[in-house]
Amino acid sequence: MAQKHDAILAAYRVFGLEGDEDFDTVRSAFRRLVKAVHPDTATDSSKETLARLQRMLKAYEVLRVYAPRFHELVITPEEARAGGLRTVTVGDRSTMVRVPPYAKTGAVVVPVGDSNWRVRIVVRDITVDGGLEVGKAEREARERKRRELEEMKAREAADESAGLLKAFCDMFVKSSPASRLANWVRKGRNAA
């Protein structure tokens, strides 16, 4: 186990890193440093340069497997106080994370059974920071509310115009003699 740990630390040192940086940091350091020794871009293509390139490629292969990957988990202050198990989607699969009681923003936990990932906890109060990050459910609720308000305004406008039209018809359009007779007959039967 100590040899494996030493090999991982040596791979970090190849890129000039301290150790335990996440894979994104390793990838950016690799891309930055490989340009200097790659045969297509390097001015010096000696054996030392090729050996350095091989060391970088081996170190990158090691860290691709063992470098941790970070994921952010946003929880409310109540959830942070209570702690407990949470299911998070990390990478392409779901995994369980134990949130310690009274967790604070910036705390890092390791998912159950997956030591390559690190989950960074962010405690965010929805009532205070509600506008910072709107989730899918909130967006859908806002959109639904906006549509309902638009429909209600359209109905009110239609009712207003329908009332004006009815008033116009009552004032300027008289019932035909046949319809007046039919109304009289209906009223007469109802009255009897």
Image: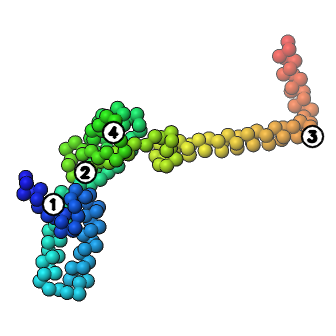
Q: Which amino acid type is shown beneath numbered disc 4? A: Ala
Q: Of label 4 and label 1, which has the lower sequence position?
A: 1
Marks 3 and 4, how far apart at CA? 75 Å
Marks 3 and 1, how far apart at CA? 94 Å
In front here: 104 or 86? 104
- In this figure, which residue is indicated by the disc labeled 4? 103
- In this figure, which residue is indicated by the disc labeled 2? 117
Q: Residue furthest top?
A: 192
- Asked whether residue 29 is in view, the answer is yes
4 vs 2, front mark: 4
Left or right: 87, with 136 as reference point: left
Residue positioned 21% across, 47% down in the render: 114
Within 10 Å of the Cα at label 4, are there few (<14), some (14-19), or many (20+) other Cα atoms?
A: some
Compared with 48, 70 (above or below) is above
Give the quarter of the image for residue 113: top left
3 vs 4, front mark: 4
Compared with 24, 157 (above or below) is above
Q: Position of residue 67 (x, y in %)?
A: 21, 57
Q: Which amino acid type is shown beneath numbered disc 3? A: Phe
Give the quarter of the figure containing the C terminus.
Answer: top right
Which element is circle 3 on?
Answer: helix
- Asked whether residue 95 is in view, the answer is no
Residue positioned 26% across, 58% down in the render: 22
Within 10 Å of the Cα at label 3, are there few (<14), some (14-19), or many (20+) other Cα atoms?
A: few
- In this figure, which residue is indicated by the disc labeled 3? 172
Which element is circle 1 on?
Answer: helix
